Amino acid sequence: MTLIQELMNQSATGSMLQGGSIKRFSPLEIRETIQTLVATEQIDTAYALGEAGLAIYPASEDMLAICGLLAVMRQDWPAAVELLQELVEAQGQNIQPFTYVMLVRALRCNLDPAGALKMANQGLHYYPGQLELEAERLALDIYSDAVSSSAHTH
């Protein structure tokens, strides 16, 4: 039985998400199920499954990635930054461009433009010309210039 089938059965019987039943599934299966739940607008169940999956597999790249995205969806910027920074550490030398982009956005939204700019520059070091990172860095440079000129005029 797939995880989505398990969740549907639990929902039909009125029972809640059971950690024991979730442990049978891999982080990849949990991530894919969360993606399906989000695509079918079952957001609360996706959040609950993400929390359960992260509790079971706290160091899993799949769980850190999907839970980071769920935090972005909720606009829980501190959680998004924390999860995505953990994902960067877990990916080590294999950080994906999308991870950089999401972390830059989360840092910016968490009111850390300096950290966002540093991460954008780091991402561009490994992925020169990556369009989303270039756009983020440009926006951060414009912001930095505006703040700088505002400070000089006051």
Image (cartoon, grey):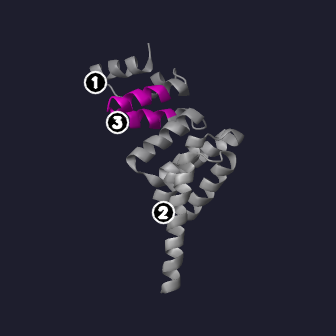
**Which of pointers 2 and 1 indicates the residue nearer the eye?**
2
> What residue span does the magenta drawing correspond to?
31-53
Residue 111 got which mark?
2
**Which of pointers 3 and 2 indicates the residue nearer the eye?**
2
Residue 43 got which mark?
3
**Image location of residue 75, percent across then percent down:** 40, 50
| Left or right of 51 on screen, residue 37 | left
| Left or right of 29 on screen, residue 13 | left
Disc 3 residue type (three-letter): Ile
Looking at the image, which is closer to me, 138 or 117?
138
59 is higher (above) or lower (below) than 142: above
- For the point 55% across and 47% down, the residue is 131
Disc 2 residue type (three-letter): Leu
**Image location of residue 22, percent across then percent down:** 47, 25
Q: Around disc 2, counting alpha carbons within 10 Å, would you say few (fewer than 14), some (14 to 19), or many (20 or more)?
A: few
First of labels 3, 2 by sequence position: 3
| Left or right of 103 on screen, residue 33 | left
Residue 45 inside the magenta-drawn segment: yes
Q: Residue furthest bottom?
A: 154
Q: Place residue 15 in its image quadrant.
A: top left
SS state under label 1: loop
First of labels 2, 1 by sequence position: 1
SS state under label 3: helix
Residue 59 inside the magenta-drawn segment: no
Residue identified by numbered label 1:
14
